[in-house]
Image (spheres, rainbow, N blue to C red):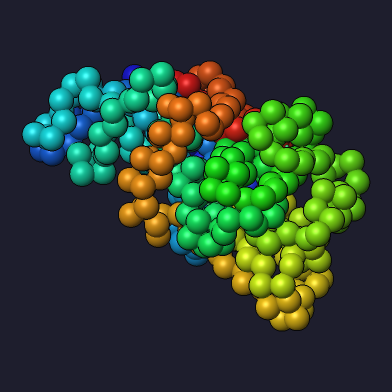
């Protein structure tokens, strides 16, 4: 029988294994225009933590007793749609299960480029890279010669954001991450400077790495990182507010930056965005990042965990930094 992961309780603070359960489910007959997909890879993403809370947001919360959802790639095994045939590879949003049944219009056919795994469409050619691309180019309006600081730099979004900044003409790119191994990897993939935010205050590191200040801050973390970036931003600096992972497991409201007034005196632009509003940029991202990949100009890393039963652990570990690059579950 197909299996799925359901949400059995909502976490307080960090999620634990007890919030999830692996259950078996029926295999329904397909209705007209539906397809059945055997999932090959599913994504675990920080935004899923927010969907575990019962709060109104840009996506509805996960429902108790029901299977979780999220990005997945898989192979069509049965089709009642003229647009899909058995064997087609598709991207869709019914992850957290071995097998998905969905309307054909909710699936997108993918053709895997030579040398890539289908998992690339969940990472380096998928949603996380689109976030990096849109955040840097459209939201922060990156310019030639900018000094760019990226937090969460060894993760899926951050590692690609830093490399796109370099490829698009940034003068200097600085990244922060939570371990010395991640910092070493960031240097290998082309960051000009990188630091371990656990070893000293972010502001201290940033003063060393960017003595003349920064022009763009790609914020994946919030908290102390945003506070330090506000100090180091040059006049007319731009902030792409992508995420605030430092507070996703918080049980109390978190204080905002202590120095937000600097946005006034420095004439800064701080702009939040949600990647799903920018899907129209996907073809441009795939064309540009795809050619950088084939030319060997961009590196990407995946941390792959095996088995649906390990998906909750992969998700919990992602929130605690177990991944380098994109965190994925192979099914
Ligand atoms: N706006 C959008 O539409 C959009 C779309 C996708 C993702 N995002 C955001 O982008 C950010 C990165 O997402 P991702 O998918 O690429 O995940 P990721 O960066 O691959 O994984 C999460 C990383 O966050 C870091 N982290 C955890 N707690 C932290 C803390 N207290 N302080 C600093 N870093 C911490 C960990 O790395 P360390 O070992 O370095 O701590 C962990 O590896 C998240 O904030 C996410 O919500 C936004």
Residue occupying the point 28% across, 28% down: 111
Residue 255 visible (yes or no): no
- Say above or below: 57 vs 124: below
Viewer-proximal residue among 21 and 82 = 82
Would residue 220 appear left or right of 64 to someone viewing this image? right
Asked where in the image residue 181 lies, by quadrant, the reply is top right
Viewer-proximal residue among 31 and 92 = 92
Asked where in the image residue 283 lies, by quadrant, the reply is top left
Q: Residue furthest bottom?
A: 264
Residue 292 coordinates in the image, percent (x, y): 46, 34
Would residue 51 appear left or right of 175 to someone viewing this image? left
Residue occupying the point 81% across, 41% down: 195
Would residue 56 appear left or right of 88 to someone viewing this image? right
Residue 208 visible (yes or no): yes
Residue occupying the point 40% across, 45% down: 285
Residue 112 coordinates in the image, percent (x, y): 33, 25
Q: Quadrant of the N terminus?
A: top left
Residue 248 coordinates in the image, percent (x, y): 66, 52
Residue occupying the point 44% across, 38% down: 289
């Amino acid at each position: 029988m197909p299996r799925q992961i359901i949400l059995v309780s909502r976490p307080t603070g960090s999620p634990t294994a007890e919030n999830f359960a692996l259950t078996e489910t029926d295999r329904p007959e397909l209705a007209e225009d539906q397809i059945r997909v055997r999932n090959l890879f599913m994504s675990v993403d920080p935004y899923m933590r927010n969907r575990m809370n019962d709060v109104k947001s840009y996506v509805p919360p996960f429902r108790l007793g029901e299977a979780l959802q999220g990005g997945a790639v898989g192979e069509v095994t049965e089709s009642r749609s003229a647009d899909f045939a058995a064997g087609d590879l598709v991207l869709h949003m019914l992850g957290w299960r071995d097998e998905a049944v969905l309307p054909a219009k909710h699936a997108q056919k993918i053709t895997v480029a030579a040398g890539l795994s289908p998992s690339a469409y969940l990472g380096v050619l998928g949603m996380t890279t689109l976030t990096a691309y849109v955040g840097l180019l459209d939201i922060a309006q990156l310019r030639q010669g900018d000094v760019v600081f990226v937090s969460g730099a060894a993760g899926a979004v951050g590692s690609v954001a830093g490399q796109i900044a370099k490829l698009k003409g940034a003068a200097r790119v600085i990244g922060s991450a939570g371990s010395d191994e991640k910092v070493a990897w960031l240097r290998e993939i082309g960051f000009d400077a990188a630091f371990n935010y656990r070893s000293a205050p972010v502001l201290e590191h940033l003063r060393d790495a960017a003595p003349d200040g920064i022009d763009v801050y790609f914020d994946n973390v919030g908290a102390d990182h945003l506070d330090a970036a506000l100090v180091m931003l040059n006049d007319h600096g731009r902030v792409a507010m992508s995420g605030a992972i430092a507070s996703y497991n918080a049980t109390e409201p978190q204080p905002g930056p202590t120095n937000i007034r600097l946005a006034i005196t420095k004439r800064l632009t701080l702009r939040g965005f949600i990647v799903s509003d920018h899907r129209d940029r996907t073809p441009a991202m795939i064309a540009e990042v795809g050619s950088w990949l084939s030319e060997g100009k961009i590196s990407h890393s995946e941390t792959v965990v095996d088995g649906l039963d390990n998906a909750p652990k992969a998700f919990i570990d992602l929130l605690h930094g177990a991944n380098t690059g994109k965190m994925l579950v192979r099914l």
